[in-house]
Amino acid sequence: MKEHLSPETPKDNLKLRLGKPKKSAAGIPAALSSMSHGIKKMGLLKTVRTLTMVNQQAGFDCPGCAWPDPSHRTSFEFCENGAKAVADEAMKAKVNPQFFQKYSVKELTGKSDHWLNKQGRIAHPMILKTGATHYTTISWKDAFNHIGSTISNLDRPEQAVFYTSGRTSNEAAFLYQAYVRALGTNNMPDCSNMCHESSGKGLGETIGIGKGTVTLEDFNEAEVILVIGQNPGTNHPRMLTALRDAKHNGAQIIHINPLPEAGLERFKHPQDYMKLDFKTTKLSDHHLQVKIGGDAALMKGFIKTHIQKGQTDASFIKNSTRGYEAMCQQAIATSWKEIVRDTGLDREVIESVGALLASSNATIACWAMGLTQQPNGVAVIQEVVNLLLMGGHVGKPGAGFCPVRGHSNVQGDRTVGIWEAPSDAFLDRMEKGLGFPMPRKHGYDVVNAIRAMNQGKVSVFFCMGGNFLSATPDTHQTAKGLRKIDLTVQVSTKLNRSHLITGKTAIILPCLGRTEIDQQADGEQFVTVENSMGIVHKSTGGLKPASPDLMSEPAIVAHLATASLKDAKLDWMNLVNHYDGIRDLMAESLAGFERYNERVREPNGFALPNPPRDTRSFATDDGFAHFTAHALPDVSVPDDCYVMMTMRSHDQYNTTIYDVHDRYRGIHGNRRVVLMNATDMAKRGWKNRQEVQLTSHFDGVERKSAHWQLVAYDIPSGNIATYFPESNTLVPLDSTAAGSNTPTSKWIIVSIDDNLTTNRVHEEE
Ligand SMILES: Nc1nc2c(c(=O)[nH]1)N[C@H]1C(S)=C(S)[C@@H](COP(=O)(O)OP(=O)(O)OC[C@H]3O[C@@H](n4cnc5c(=O)[nH]c(N)nc54)[C@H](O)[C@@H]3O)O[C@H]1N2
Ligand SMILES: Nc1nc2c(c(=O)[nH]1)N[C@H]1C(S)=C(S)[C@@H](COP(=O)(O)OP(=O)(O)OC[C@H]3O[C@@H](n4cnc5c(=O)[nH]c(N)nc54)[C@H](O)[C@@H]3O)O[C@H]1N2
Ligand SMILES: [Mo]
């Protein structure tokens, strides 16, 4: 029997320290934290030089998040966590061939995620040969020959799967999807499947576009802004500036979240200190501390109030929408008793906020993972759509939908073709532009890719960035699937656990990051990205690459295509000599990309077509926006069980752990913590730091995870919270949102046990 090491990250051996949760975000501590992460990783000079290039017209797009940049920029267009993301990529430390000589894969598996990331940038292509204990160097040429011959020897193209994370540029992503489709498959799962897929589905079906409909300027004209299931103080700090400005213009902010989240309580822009202004701004006017999964019921409560108050936009409803009556009947039939039970909120509170919404002339709804990663992720977003459509809050100033995207180019990747389930219209256009036939059969998304791996249907797994092992549900099941694959390939900047739990042979291809100069045959290249509000713009790296042995992502795709396609179909290598060639092809193959090379060179880029926003029109089947009538989801929980959400700390970027702190929540030193309601803890006789085991329950299957510490926290009774990716072992693979197949990372039924004798024994083949 082969020894199989645990795919879980070992704990950093530090003691749990608890402080008081913060009531205000950013400010001086954030400025200091940006600088200290920078200086520790890049040194002082490089820190100053690098941070002044972030989000500038001639600089690079921040690899942190997808929040847009204002058109009038200051020299300070980054935030604490953007600065951390930049420092983490531009750090001086290197993971070079000597490093891999020193540490076996087994030894590395014993190191924490925090430690792995701290070792630096991967500097050279590496291979883990079948049965080997260590990664050894491989030349780029041999690496492509190996990958190319493995792929071209497959019986069927569907035996290969190509994952994408959301930092990949438009140029790299476009070329990559062209290659995968030239090979003959749509097997392109991406991080979006675990992220905003529910938003894409929910919006696409109702307003005819799977994207948001607001611009940054709309925030200044909004009367009410809803922030639902989102923690911007940590995950989109630059959004707080937009919310502050909106507030100064008179907007009311409604925060809907089981947790208080410091960023939405008070905010201080670090830059204001330079103006000797020490005041903080109170951001949210109302915090509705809804129970996990209670948002659908809450929206019904708002809609009922709205119907009762009148003040709906009757002419918009009549002329531009369908389904209003059925939606209203469904809402009226939902009783206040059910709404109060599912939300955990008082009827009076819901009615008073509902009245505010009914009287607003311009409302924006923002949301993120608190809604999308629910079993009813698609339906609950459609309830938000119902609420806004009633008041005509779309396609007019200060109003509309704002799904706040995660990865900095996740929206662009989807726009240019990273999509396992493309529409025929999309493929028809692509076919015309590229000049070769497109496969029509839909491919695997993330969850179906893991199932296929476990069924032995996948022989090659190629990852353009990301950390598939740790980001996906049910870590042990995913590990089992990955180990059955013949060849896994990771295009990466930093070391992560997906380099350690691999197929029989594994290859690491180290690539350039956003911050670095991309030198090709025809000179230095820029790339393009699309932000959360559909603006496409340039990003130009300015730093010397971390190592001379790195390759750009577009160049990697070109070599891969050349090495593995029997019929080349495109002149891949010539396309990467100058990325204008790729952009010309994009202009031919994608709707809305006409004269791409010209328009993307405008100082602030350009906005992609967005019918609801541009002309208040809806590209649905019948040309109308649609109300939808959904029954309330069943949010009942078995006795003695809790609902668990898995979320991000302030010191991580998804699976990249910068440090072991969660400053705003006052939790330090240990990430294996369970945030729990103090009364719930007292009922079971538990105090802070109690060690417990968690068991998740789904479809009769139990998943166990031991060695967690309880922390009393301001969270509704019956709800608990843990950090991702440590808790991913508990996320059931088959628990996904209806309609989007997104893992329900914010809805996991868990029992808690202080008897630690039943440690999980993992079955290994
Ligand atoms: N620094 C930093 N920035 C990031 C990331 C990062 O890891 N670090 N990740 C990036 C990515 S890919 C993404 S997708 C985004 C994620 O950004 P967020 O969606 O803000 O991330 P999460 O930490 O998952 O937090 C979700 C929020 O939803 C709330 N929530 C949970 N369940 C419910 C519910 O049932 N109802 C409601 N109303 N709220 C609920 C939680 O309390 C939490 O505040 O951030 C992006 N930006
Ligand atoms: N339980 C639970 N699970 C979740 C979530 C949750 O809230 N709870 N959130 C989900 C969400 S929203 C998302 S988006 C996914 C994230 O899933 P992924 O996108 O797969 O994961 P990341 O941790 O962002 O990937 C980090 C790795 O990307 C590589 N990388 C960084 N920059 C670059 C680059 O420029 N190019 C290349 N090629 N590689 C690069 C580095 O090697 C780094 O180790 O996780 C999902 N998983
Ligand atoms: Mo995400």
Image (cartoon, rainbow, N blue to C red):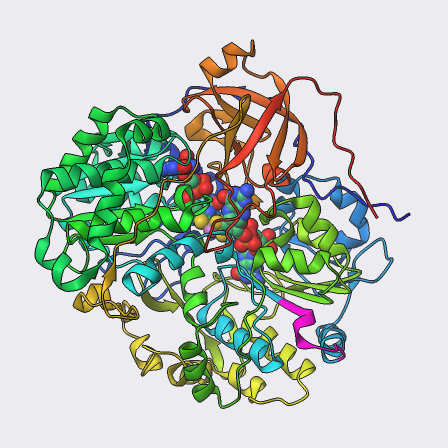
Residue 376 visible (yes or no): yes
Question: Magenta region: which residues?
Answer: 153-161
Question: Residue drawn at (38%, 39%), measured in percent from left and top?
Answer: 231
Question: Residue drawn at (69%, 70%), measured in percent from left and top?
Answer: 159
Q: Using residue 513 as the reference point, say whether residue 563 is left or right of it.
A: right
Residue 501 visible (yes or no): no
Residue 212 falls in image quadrant: bottom left
| In-front residue for pair 229/597 | 229
| In-front residue for pair 101/339 | 339
In the rendering, at what x and y percent does residue 578 appear? 48, 83
The answer to if 322 sits in the magenta stretch is no
In the rendered view, would you say 613 is above or below 664?
Answer: below
In the rendered view, would you say 22 is above or below 84?
Answer: above
In the rendering, at what x and y percent does residue 528 appear? 40, 70
| In-front residue for pair 318/487 | 318
Q: Using residue 121 as the reference point, say whether residue 27 is left or right of it.
A: left
Q: Using residue 401 as the reference point, say whether residue 556 is left or right of it.
A: right
The residue at the far right in this view is 1
The answer to if 160 sits in the magenta stretch is yes
In the rendering, at what x and y percent does residue 275 appear? 21, 38
In the rendered view, would you say 336 is above or below 577?
Answer: above
Q: Using residue 158 as the reference point, say whether residue 72 is left or right of it.
A: left
In the rendering, at what x and y percent does residue 200 appear? 39, 59
Question: Residue drawn at (35%, 34%), measured in percent from left and top?
Answer: 257
Q: How many marks?
A: 0
